[in-house]
Image (spheres, rainbow, N blue to C red):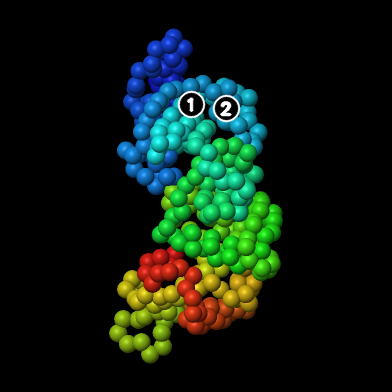
Amino acid sequence: MTPAGSLRFVLAAALAAAACGRPAPETAASREAREAMLFTIASQFRESAASIGVIEFEPVEFRDGCLEVERTATCARARTPGYRLRVRRQGGLYEYRAPSASPTDVVLASGPDPHIGAPALEWRWPAGPGGCRTLLVSADARPAVGWCDGPVAEVEWLTELFQLQEWEYFRGRFAPFTLTHDGHTLAFQGRGVDAGSEPWRHALERWAALRWSDLNAGRSGAAHGRGLAYRKPRRGASGTATCDVLEVTEYGVAYAGASLCEGGGGEPGKTAWLSDPLWNEMGVWLEEWAPYTDEAAGLYFFGRGTHVPDAEEARRLIAWCERALVHVAASATEAWQTSDPRTRTR
Protein backbone atom coordinates (compact mmCIF):
# COMPACT_ATOMS: atom_id res chain seq x y z
CA MET A 1 0.00 0.00 0.00
CA THR A 2 1.34 3.49 -0.83
CA PRO A 3 1.95 6.02 1.99
CA ALA A 4 -1.01 8.07 0.74
CA GLY A 5 -3.19 4.98 0.71
CA SER A 6 -2.03 4.07 4.20
CA LEU A 7 -2.95 7.51 5.51
CA ARG A 8 -6.42 7.27 3.92
CA PHE A 9 -6.89 3.85 5.52
CA VAL A 10 -5.88 5.15 8.95
CA LEU A 11 -8.18 8.17 8.62
CA ALA A 12 -11.11 6.03 7.44
CA ALA A 13 -10.66 3.72 10.42
CA ALA A 14 -10.50 6.67 12.79
CA LEU A 15 -13.66 8.18 11.31
CA ALA A 16 -15.46 4.87 11.66
CA ALA A 17 -14.44 4.62 15.31
CA ALA A 18 -15.63 8.17 15.95
CA ALA A 19 -18.96 7.39 14.30
CA CYS A 20 -19.44 4.50 16.71
CA GLY A 21 -18.93 6.82 19.69
CA ARG A 22 -15.49 5.52 20.61
CA PRO A 23 -12.37 7.73 20.80
CA ALA A 24 -10.25 7.23 17.73
CA PRO A 25 -7.10 5.25 18.56
CA GLU A 26 -3.94 7.31 18.20
CA THR A 27 -1.76 6.24 15.33
CA ALA A 28 1.64 7.42 14.18
CA ALA A 29 -0.03 9.38 11.37
CA SER A 30 -2.54 11.14 13.64
CA ARG A 31 0.13 11.87 16.24
CA GLU A 32 2.33 13.42 13.54
CA ALA A 33 -0.59 15.51 12.27
CA ARG A 34 -1.42 16.75 15.78
CA GLU A 35 2.19 17.75 16.43
CA ALA A 36 2.40 19.52 13.07
CA MET A 37 -0.75 21.53 13.81
CA LEU A 38 0.43 22.36 17.32
CA PHE A 39 3.86 23.49 16.10
CA THR A 40 2.28 25.77 13.49
CA ILE A 41 -0.07 27.34 16.04
CA ALA A 42 2.75 27.82 18.58
CA SER A 43 4.92 29.46 15.91
CA GLN A 44 2.24 32.07 15.19
CA PHE A 45 1.99 32.93 18.89
CA ARG A 46 5.80 32.72 19.26
CA GLU A 47 5.49 30.29 22.13
CA SER A 48 6.64 26.76 22.77
CA ALA A 49 4.22 24.02 21.83
CA ALA A 50 4.45 22.78 25.44
CA SER A 51 2.86 26.03 26.67
CA ILE A 52 -0.33 25.35 24.71
CA GLY A 53 -2.67 22.84 26.31
CA VAL A 54 -4.35 20.31 24.04
CA ILE A 55 -7.98 19.75 25.02
CA GLU A 56 -9.13 17.58 22.13
CA PHE A 57 -7.78 16.29 18.85
CA GLU A 58 -9.82 14.23 16.42
CA PRO A 59 -10.13 13.31 12.74
CA VAL A 60 -13.17 14.82 11.04
CA GLU A 61 -14.73 14.69 7.60
CA PHE A 62 -15.73 18.27 6.80
CA ARG A 63 -18.56 19.10 4.41
CA ASP A 64 -16.57 21.55 2.27
CA GLY A 65 -13.11 22.68 1.25
CA CYS A 66 -13.24 25.56 3.77
CA LEU A 67 -13.39 23.01 6.60
CA GLU A 68 -16.78 24.47 7.59
CA VAL A 69 -15.24 27.78 8.73
CA GLU A 70 -17.24 30.90 7.84
CA ARG A 71 -15.09 33.38 5.90
CA THR A 72 -14.93 35.31 2.65
CA ALA A 73 -14.11 32.48 0.27
CA THR A 74 -15.54 30.27 -2.44
CA CYS A 75 -15.69 26.82 -0.88
CA ALA A 76 -15.63 23.62 -2.90
CA ARG A 77 -18.67 21.54 -1.93
CA ALA A 78 -16.75 18.34 -1.46
CA ARG A 79 -16.18 16.11 1.53
CA THR A 80 -12.76 16.97 2.94
CA PRO A 81 -11.02 14.68 5.45
CA GLY A 82 -9.11 16.55 8.11
CA TYR A 83 -8.46 17.17 11.78
CA ARG A 84 -9.93 19.31 14.53
CA LEU A 85 -7.68 20.54 17.35
CA ARG A 86 -9.01 22.36 20.41
CA VAL A 87 -6.47 24.04 22.66
CA ARG A 88 -6.25 26.34 25.67
CA ARG A 89 -3.82 29.28 25.60
CA GLN A 90 -3.51 31.89 28.34
CA GLY A 91 -6.96 30.95 29.58
CA GLY A 92 -8.58 31.30 26.15
CA LEU A 93 -10.10 28.48 24.11
CA TYR A 94 -9.18 28.10 20.44
CA GLU A 95 -10.25 25.67 17.75
CA TYR A 96 -8.13 24.97 14.68
CA ARG A 97 -8.79 22.73 11.71
CA ALA A 98 -6.55 21.36 8.97
CA PRO A 99 -6.90 19.08 5.95
CA SER A 100 -5.44 15.62 6.40
CA ALA A 101 -3.37 16.10 3.25
CA SER A 102 -1.54 19.08 4.80
CA PRO A 103 -1.84 19.35 8.60
CA THR A 104 0.42 22.44 8.73
CA ASP A 105 -2.23 24.42 6.79
CA VAL A 106 -4.12 25.19 9.97
CA VAL A 107 -7.34 27.20 9.86
CA LEU A 108 -8.59 29.20 12.84
CA ALA A 109 -12.20 28.16 13.42
CA SER A 110 -12.86 30.02 16.67
CA GLY A 111 -11.05 31.80 19.46
CA PRO A 112 -11.35 34.58 22.04
CA ASP A 113 -12.73 37.85 20.70
CA PRO A 114 -9.73 40.23 20.43
CA HIS A 115 -12.10 43.24 20.72
CA ILE A 116 -10.42 45.15 17.91
CA GLY A 117 -13.39 47.48 17.50
CA ALA A 118 -13.08 50.01 14.68
CA PRO A 119 -9.57 49.17 13.42
CA ALA A 120 -6.93 51.82 12.84
CA LEU A 121 -5.73 49.66 9.95
CA GLU A 122 -7.55 46.98 7.98
CA TRP A 123 -5.51 45.26 5.27
CA ARG A 124 -7.17 42.64 3.08
CA TRP A 125 -5.84 40.13 0.57
CA PRO A 126 -8.91 38.83 -1.31
CA ALA A 127 -6.91 36.24 -3.29
CA GLY A 128 -5.05 34.91 -0.26
CA PRO A 129 -4.55 31.17 0.27
CA GLY A 130 -7.81 29.60 1.36
CA GLY A 131 -9.77 32.81 0.90
CA CYS A 132 -9.53 36.46 1.86
CA ARG A 133 -6.85 37.04 4.53
CA THR A 134 -6.64 40.08 6.79
CA LEU A 135 -4.42 42.04 9.15
CA LEU A 136 -6.15 44.32 11.65
CA VAL A 137 -4.52 46.82 13.99
CA SER A 138 -6.65 48.18 16.82
CA ALA A 139 -6.78 51.81 17.90
CA ASP A 140 -4.51 50.88 20.81
CA ALA A 141 -1.97 49.23 18.46
CA ARG A 142 -2.81 45.54 18.93
CA PRO A 143 -2.44 43.39 15.78
CA ALA A 144 -4.68 40.48 14.79
CA VAL A 145 -4.55 38.13 11.81
CA GLY A 146 -7.11 35.77 10.34
CA TRP A 147 -9.95 35.65 7.86
CA CYS A 148 -11.87 38.49 6.24
CA ASP A 149 -15.36 38.38 7.80
CA GLY A 150 -14.27 35.37 9.83
CA PRO A 151 -12.30 34.42 12.94
CA VAL A 152 -9.17 36.43 13.79
CA ALA A 153 -6.59 35.90 16.53
CA GLU A 154 -4.70 38.60 18.40
CA VAL A 155 -0.94 38.15 18.09
CA GLU A 156 2.16 39.98 19.32
CA TRP A 157 4.34 42.34 17.32
CA LEU A 158 7.74 40.91 16.45
CA THR A 159 9.70 43.25 18.71
CA GLU A 160 13.07 42.39 17.17
CA LEU A 161 11.78 43.84 13.87
CA PHE A 162 10.62 47.12 15.47
CA GLN A 163 7.16 46.65 14.03
CA LEU A 164 5.42 48.68 16.77
CA GLN A 165 7.86 51.59 16.27
CA GLU A 166 7.14 51.54 12.55
CA TRP A 167 3.38 51.43 13.14
CA GLU A 168 3.57 54.41 15.50
CA TYR A 169 5.52 56.36 12.87
CA PHE A 170 3.00 55.69 10.11
CA ARG A 171 -0.04 56.38 12.28
CA GLY A 172 1.42 59.52 13.78
CA ARG A 173 2.47 61.01 10.44
CA PHE A 174 -0.22 60.23 7.87
CA ALA A 175 -3.88 61.21 7.58
CA PRO A 176 -6.60 58.61 6.93
CA PHE A 177 -6.89 57.11 3.44
CA THR A 178 -8.08 54.02 1.59
CA LEU A 179 -6.19 52.22 -1.14
CA THR A 180 -6.42 49.31 -3.54
CA HIS A 181 -2.96 48.26 -4.67
CA ASP A 182 -1.22 45.12 -5.93
CA GLY A 183 -4.29 42.94 -5.31
CA HIS A 184 -4.72 44.20 -1.74
CA THR A 185 -7.02 46.73 -0.07
CA LEU A 186 -6.09 49.03 2.79
CA ALA A 187 -8.21 51.20 5.06
CA PHE A 188 -6.00 53.36 7.28
CA GLN A 189 -7.11 55.69 10.07
CA GLY A 190 -4.02 57.76 10.78
CA ARG A 191 -3.72 60.57 13.30
CA GLY A 192 -1.41 62.73 11.22
CA VAL A 193 -2.00 65.57 8.79
CA ASP A 194 0.28 64.43 5.95
CA ALA A 195 -1.95 63.25 3.08
CA GLY A 196 0.93 61.12 1.81
CA SER A 197 2.23 60.86 -1.75
CA GLU A 198 1.35 57.77 -3.77
CA PRO A 199 4.76 56.17 -3.04
CA TRP A 200 4.23 56.67 0.70
CA ARG A 201 0.72 55.21 0.54
CA HIS A 202 2.10 52.23 -1.35
CA ALA A 203 4.83 51.98 1.29
CA LEU A 204 2.26 51.62 4.05
CA GLU A 205 0.34 48.98 2.08
CA ARG A 206 3.57 47.07 1.44
CA TRP A 207 4.44 47.36 5.14
CA ALA A 208 1.03 45.90 6.04
CA ALA A 209 1.50 43.00 3.59
CA LEU A 210 4.92 42.22 5.09
CA ARG A 211 3.60 42.47 8.64
CA TRP A 212 0.73 40.10 7.82
CA SER A 213 3.26 37.59 6.49
CA ASP A 214 5.50 37.94 9.56
CA LEU A 215 2.69 37.76 12.10
CA ASN A 216 0.88 34.92 10.35
CA ALA A 217 4.04 32.79 10.47
CA GLY A 218 5.46 34.14 13.72
CA ARG A 219 8.81 34.86 12.07
CA SER A 220 10.49 36.73 9.24
CA GLY A 221 13.12 35.78 6.68
CA ALA A 222 16.55 37.43 6.87
CA ALA A 223 16.03 39.56 3.75
CA HIS A 224 12.27 39.91 4.11
CA GLY A 225 11.24 43.38 2.94
CA ARG A 226 14.59 44.44 1.50
CA GLY A 227 14.36 46.77 -1.49
CA LEU A 228 18.00 47.67 -2.12
CA ALA A 229 21.51 46.95 -0.86
CA TYR A 230 24.68 48.89 -1.71
CA ARG A 231 28.30 48.40 -0.66
CA LYS A 232 31.01 50.94 -1.49
CA PRO A 233 34.69 50.52 -0.55
CA ARG A 234 35.96 53.43 1.51
CA ARG A 235 38.63 55.52 -0.15
CA GLY A 236 42.09 55.31 1.34
CA ALA A 237 41.21 52.32 3.52
CA SER A 238 44.31 50.31 4.38
CA GLY A 239 44.59 46.65 5.27
CA THR A 240 41.31 44.74 5.14
CA ALA A 241 38.93 46.70 2.93
CA THR A 242 36.03 48.39 4.68
CA CYS A 243 32.80 49.22 2.85
CA ASP A 244 30.11 51.77 3.51
CA VAL A 245 26.84 49.83 3.54
CA LEU A 246 23.34 51.00 2.67
CA GLU A 247 20.22 48.87 2.95
CA VAL A 248 16.71 50.09 2.17
CA THR A 249 13.39 48.48 3.02
CA GLU A 250 10.42 48.31 0.68
CA TYR A 251 8.56 50.84 2.83
CA GLY A 252 10.99 53.71 3.33
CA VAL A 253 13.47 52.91 6.10
CA ALA A 254 17.21 53.03 5.32
CA TYR A 255 20.18 51.67 7.27
CA ALA A 256 23.70 53.05 6.82
CA GLY A 257 26.78 51.57 8.41
CA ALA A 258 30.08 49.92 7.65
CA SER A 259 31.38 46.38 7.42
CA LEU A 260 34.23 44.44 5.90
CA CYS A 261 33.71 44.36 2.15
CA GLU A 262 33.92 40.58 2.22
CA GLY A 263 31.26 40.49 4.94
CA GLY A 264 31.23 40.53 8.71
CA GLY A 265 32.93 42.84 11.17
CA GLY A 266 32.23 46.51 10.82
CA GLU A 267 30.80 49.06 13.20
CA PRO A 268 27.31 50.02 14.45
CA GLY A 269 25.27 51.98 11.97
CA LYS A 270 22.03 53.93 12.18
CA THR A 271 18.59 53.93 10.60
CA ALA A 272 16.36 56.71 9.32
CA TRP A 273 13.12 57.19 7.46
CA LEU A 274 13.91 58.45 3.99
CA SER A 275 13.07 62.01 3.01
CA ASP A 276 10.14 62.63 0.68
CA PRO A 277 12.35 63.37 -2.35
CA LEU A 278 14.39 60.21 -1.80
CA TRP A 279 11.43 57.90 -1.17
CA ASN A 280 9.21 59.36 -3.89
CA GLU A 281 11.96 58.44 -6.34
CA MET A 282 12.84 55.02 -4.93
CA GLY A 283 9.22 54.04 -4.34
CA VAL A 284 8.41 54.46 -8.02
CA TRP A 285 11.50 52.51 -9.09
CA LEU A 286 10.60 49.60 -6.81
CA GLU A 287 7.14 49.45 -8.38
CA GLU A 288 8.24 49.78 -12.02
CA TRP A 289 11.76 48.39 -12.38
CA ALA A 290 12.82 44.75 -12.45
CA PRO A 291 15.52 43.34 -10.14
CA TYR A 292 19.01 44.50 -11.09
CA THR A 293 22.48 43.50 -9.88
CA ASP A 294 25.87 45.09 -10.53
CA GLU A 295 28.31 43.20 -8.32
CA ALA A 296 31.28 45.28 -9.46
CA ALA A 297 29.51 48.41 -8.23
CA GLY A 298 28.15 46.68 -5.10
CA LEU A 299 24.55 47.36 -6.13
CA TYR A 300 21.65 44.95 -5.52
CA PHE A 301 18.19 46.25 -6.41
CA PHE A 302 15.09 44.16 -5.70
CA GLY A 303 12.44 45.80 -7.85
CA ARG A 304 9.00 44.25 -8.38
CA GLY A 305 8.35 45.62 -11.87
CA THR A 306 9.25 44.55 -15.40
CA HIS A 307 11.37 47.40 -16.78
CA VAL A 308 15.04 46.38 -16.87
CA PRO A 309 17.21 49.38 -15.87
CA ASP A 310 19.63 50.52 -18.56
CA ALA A 311 23.14 51.85 -17.95
CA GLU A 312 21.99 55.40 -17.31
CA GLU A 313 19.31 54.28 -14.88
CA ALA A 314 21.87 52.14 -13.06
CA ARG A 315 24.02 55.24 -12.62
CA ARG A 316 20.96 57.02 -11.22
CA LEU A 317 20.52 54.22 -8.70
CA ILE A 318 24.11 54.55 -7.51
CA ALA A 319 23.82 58.34 -7.29
CA TRP A 320 20.62 57.87 -5.28
CA CYS A 321 22.50 55.53 -2.90
CA GLU A 322 25.16 58.19 -2.32
CA ARG A 323 22.49 60.74 -1.43
CA ALA A 324 20.74 58.27 0.85
CA LEU A 325 23.99 57.55 2.74
CA VAL A 326 24.38 61.27 3.40
CA HIS A 327 20.73 61.57 4.46
CA VAL A 328 20.93 58.76 7.02
CA ALA A 329 24.24 60.02 8.43
CA ALA A 330 22.76 63.51 8.90
CA SER A 331 19.41 62.35 10.33
CA ALA A 332 18.83 63.45 13.92
CA THR A 333 16.28 60.72 14.66
CA GLU A 334 16.64 56.97 14.20
CA ALA A 335 13.79 54.97 12.70
CA TRP A 336 14.50 52.07 15.05
CA GLN A 337 15.86 52.71 18.51
CA THR A 338 18.90 50.49 18.20
CA SER A 339 22.51 50.67 17.09
CA ASP A 340 22.87 46.93 16.52
CA PRO A 341 24.01 46.40 12.90
CA ARG A 342 22.50 42.92 12.90
CA THR A 343 19.02 44.44 12.67
CA ARG A 344 19.59 46.14 9.35
CA THR A 345 18.01 43.41 7.16
CA ARG A 346 14.25 43.09 7.35
Judged from this view, the residue extending furthest toward the bottom is 236
Residue at (45, 33) in percent of width and height = 93
Give how far across and how far down residue 154 sits, in percent. 49, 45
Measured along the vertical axis of the image, is residue 114 above or below residue 64? below
Q: Nearer the viewer, residue 5 or 329?
A: 329
Q: Nearer the viewer, residue 166 or 7?
A: 166
Look at the image and tell me whether residue 202 can be seen. no
State which quadrant residue 192 falls in. Answer: bottom right
Give how far across and how far down residue 334 sits, in percent. 47, 73
Residue type at mark 1: give it. Answer: Gly
Residue type at mark 2: give it. Answer: Glu
Give how far across and how far down residue 128 sits, in percent. 59, 43
- Separation of disc 2 and disc 1 at Cα? 11 Å
Residue located beneath label 1 in the image: 82
Residue 196 located left or right of residue 250: right
State which quadrant residue 158 falls in. Answer: bottom left
Q: Quadrant of the N terminus?
A: top left
Q: Nearer the viewer, residue 235 or 116?
A: 116
Give how far across and how far down residue 5 sits, in percent. 44, 22
Numbered circles on residues, count: 2
Secondary structure, mark 2, is: loop
Is disc 2 surrounded by few (<14), some (14 to 19) or many (20+) residues within 10 Å?
A: some
Q: Are marks 2 and 1 in contact (CB under 8 Å)?
A: no
Residue 112 located left or right of residue 63: left
Residue 116 numbered mark, or none: none
Secondary structure, mark 1, is: strand
Look at the image and tell me whether residue 330 can be seen. yes
Residue located beneath label 2 in the image: 68
- Tell me which label, 2 or 1, sits earlier in the chain: 2
Residue at (60, 46) in percent of width and height = 117
Judged from this view, the residue extending furthest toward the left is 239
